[in-house]
Amino acid sequence: MTEAQDPRTTRSTTRSTTKATVGMRVTHRRYVPYSHAHYAGNLVDGAYSLAAFGDVATELCIVTDDDEGLFASYSDVQFRSRVQAGDVIEISAELVRVGRRSREMDFEVRVVARGDEERGGSAAQVLDPPVVATTARGVVVVP
């Protein structure tokens, strides 16, 4: 019996094959709390979108490689529209390239609902179509 066949061993000598396939997508939705507003008009800083990209990239790596992965780089980050406190945002990561250890992803933050203070303190509306707020491309490395 080899070490890989021995059920008592905790170390595997073979790595499972990746499930990563171009076109795979992960999407999260979240409410942007007022505690994250940093600027006039309840504007949220751009780092909020980048942190959200990290969350969807982590889930995509777990789904595809059974590992959280490590971010290597962002490229072509574009802040196209504002994100503000009271928004509901949808964050997605789509796998666009699969290397031996790298995973290249396209990211997008869309505002799908927004608070409407003119109609009242708790009023809000669904945005149809959603507003694309932030886009980027990133590379994550997995073991």
Image (cartoon, rainbow, N blue to C red):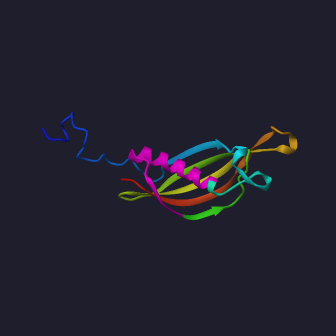
Q: Is residue 134 left or right of residue 56?
A: right
Report x, y in % for residue 114.
75, 45
Considering depth in this image, is 132 or 48 the residue closer to the camera?
Answer: 48
Residue 120: in magenta span: no
Compared to 25, does 134 lie above or below? below
View extreme (top): residue: 8
Report x, y in % for residue 108.
60, 54
Q: Is residue 11 left or right of residue 82?
A: left
Compared to 126, does 78 lie above or below? below
Q: Quadrant of residue 81?
A: bottom right
Considering depth in this image, is 41 or 19 the residue closer to the camera?
Answer: 41
Compared to 71, does 12 lie above or below? above
Q: Is residue 79 left or right of residue 73?
A: right
The residues colored magenta run 48-74
Residue pictured at 63% horizontal, 63% vertical: 78
Report x, y in % for residue 25.
51, 48
Check the picture and name the quadrant holding the N terminus. Answer: top left
Residue pictured at 20% horizontal, 41% vertical: 4
View extreme (bottom): residue: 76
Q: Quadrant of residue 8?
A: top left
Q: Quadrant of residue 40?
A: bottom right
Count of residue discs: 0
Report x, y in % for residue 18.
36, 49
View extreme (left): residue: 1
